[in-house]
Image: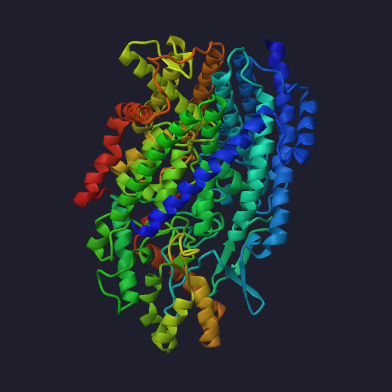
Amino acid sequence: MLKQIYKSSLKSAVATGSLALLVCGVYPAVVTVFGKILFPDQASGGRLERDGKLVGAKLIGQVFTRPEYFHGRPSLAGSGYDATSSSGSNLGPTNQKFHDSLKSNLESVLKENPDLKWGEVPNDLVTASGSGLDPHVSPRGAWVQVGRVSKARGINSDQLKSLIDAHTTGPQWGIFGEPTVNILVLNLELDRAYPLHAQARSSGEGLQSSVSAAGVRCGSETSFCSIKQK
Amino acid sequence: MSLRDLLQLFLLVVILFLSTKPLGLYLEKVYDGDKTFLSFVLRPVEKFIYRLLKIDPCEDQYWAKYAIDLLIFSAVSLVFTYAVLRLQPFLPLNPAHQGVVTPHLSFNTAMSFVTNTDWQSYGGESTLSYFSQMVGLTFQNFVSASMGMGVAVALIRSLAKKEGQGIGNFWADLIRGTLYVLLPLCVVIAIILISQGVIQNFLPYQEITTLEGAKQTIAQGPVASQSAIQMLGTNGGGFFSSNSAHPYENPTPLSNFIQMLSIFLIPSALVYLLGKKVGNLKHGWAVWSAMLIVFLAGALICSHFEYQGNPIYQKLGCVSSSNLEGKEARFGIFNSALFATVTTDASCGAVNSMHDSYTPFGGLVPLVNIMLGEVIFGGVGSGLYGMLMYVILTVFIAGLMVGRTPEYLGKKIEGREVKYVMFSLIVMALSILGFTAWGSLDAAGVAGVGNPGGHGFSEILYAFTSATGNNGSALAGLSTNTPFWNLTLAFAMFFGRFFMMIPMLALAGSMVKKRVHPGGEGTFPVDGPLFVGLLLGVIILVGALTFFPALSLGPIAEHFDMLQGHSYK
């Protein structure tokens, strides 16, 4: 009996070593090489550049609080769109904190978009996504912001609407998933087609906006921010 | 539910159906050691490993020997993964400088991956290095899945054999499953996933300046290679904390579809293999249709309740009451609910939306799926042998009803076999309910709860159900990175894995020795609608009788609270 256990342990160790080499060495290496050759952009994260500087990744949402940008969904990843700690709110349907966060998100969406009527707020604009990094909103979620953005940029709202249409994708292959608008890509295009004054992008203002971002996303409920996935 | 929703569901079923036979036939060749179209590359590797191990792949092992090898291999690989996690800062591929993982978290994580559960008490991108993910965890994803398939195939062999003692060779099953089945499929799926935007690189975390001028750090890593095996091996352990909700892990609706399909792919083919091996294809398809019926019911119920949502949305001023909290815009309600159903039908546990934020009945579906033993296609291997437990129970009950000795595929079912089956069922129920009671009473357990009211109880119940069922999905509001939770969950995972596998191997050892009797007039047919109906009845009856009281304290109570507009502080 003992001898068999000893022999079996020895085999296990050898099997662990040889299989580990295959599935942890050869396999990821093969996938990495193929990925690099066939789909280099995707494999390295869909990087978005502007004027030679990295401004984001196509699939990773960012905090938007300024009126001249389209805003994404509330985020519970870190202090908002923290791409090193993805997370949803994990609040249950009968949790008072969930009701409070909905309410404060609704209030800020209604305040930011005076044209938007009570009872017509798209659900995706007031609910936190699962990852906290969702780069998309529904087309409706973008349309309801047209009034605010066009005023802030001083451009015609029809131009904005056609821009949204051009950036609406899906359902994929006409079948899969939901139609969505990538907010980050849309905002980049917005900056390119209808640029603001250069100083609006200065770093001093940026720092301020990142601080206020956390406040807006979580409403006045500071305790809400502390409830997170481990 | 829209027509397009149903079309997506229909497509999933059709593609799964079409893949079942070819993959099943391929599995037959692999586990018989026959030549396949990949043999020219893989056979030399296979032979080389046999030589290293000094084993004869043709040696037909007695069930106990198979079981001992399996247990020892699991123990050795448990120590291996534990060591990798504990030594993390001293190992390579750690660009984000992740520190030492605590002992209880390392134990929980190692057990979690050895048992094919992939419960994550940690946040991937904030705790683990690339090396830990790849070597510590991905390794287990492959071998634990391969072991599960091996046990299922051993059980099939024991039913198919006309005479003999052996149920196959553990080492050959382990190595063949990994080499011929999991590796090639994973390479293909991983590359498809990359095409959709799943990342695969070893870059350091990227620092960027956002459009509004803030700093953002974006986690990177070899995600596609882990994501592929996470689905195909029904492991579920994601690279990132938010698992397949993360846009880098599941970027498009198509990648989502591919992931759902890969979860069901192998479990479905194994059912065909059962029919083929025992020489009764109709029986295989009968079992398959029983699985399909429960799957469709679950998917429709779950998505219905998520669409119906929570009345609070409209009360506060939203346009509809659909529950989008914790769901990604690109998947919407339907693909989130469908994924939740698929991942818990199988013992996968990957999530593309946060189950904790589901409506009570929407969240009830995943919970019940796991409680039924994840036999709806199920985990790779574990789904089939779990289903065979119910099949044996069904045949036994049907036999009792007509007063004859029950037979399954010509082999008599006697006291011993039914005891093995009941042992597994009772251990599972005891582990889920016992641990849940403990977790609800112990202050250290309650401390982890993230939501008040009935929902908090659901979190505890879900955690131990998921751990015992080796699923790994969670109501993630529960904070489980504490000694109490890490240890209790680790033991629940241990019971759920090995107290099911070992009795199933014993069952195989006992069935293999039985002579095959030709079926007579009074033999209960296992291939018609009557059998499917009875099987479904048994599954639902056993599940309902065991778990209804617990469910009524959690999701059912919460459902009525929600409709009334109640909330808890």
Q: Which residue lies furthest to the front in this view?
A: B521
Q: Which residue lies furthest to the left in this view?
A: B564
Of the 4 image quadrants, the one containing the N terminus of chain B is bottom left
Residue at 73 percent across and 55 percent down: it is: A33
Q: Which of A227 and B335 is in front in this view?
A: B335
Residue at 36 percent across and 58 percent down: it is: B3
Relative to residue A146, is residue B19 drawn left or right?
right
Relative to residue B54, is residue B536 drawn left or right?
left
Whole-percent x and y of residue B464?
42, 33
Whether residue B236 is visible: no
Whole-percent x and y of residue A50?
62, 77
Relative to residue A193, is residue B345 drawn left or right?
left
Which image quarter: residue A139? bottom left
Image label count: 0
Residue at 40 percent across and 73 percent down: it is: A142
Colour scheme of the picture: rainbow
Q: Nearer the viewer, residue B87 or B301?
A: B301
Q: Which of A229 and B256 is in front in this view?
A: B256
Above-or-below relation of B135 to A45: above
Whether residue B45 is visible: yes
Whole-percent x and y of residue B177?
65, 34
Above-or-below relation of B539 to B413: below
Whole-percent x and y of residue B63?
60, 16
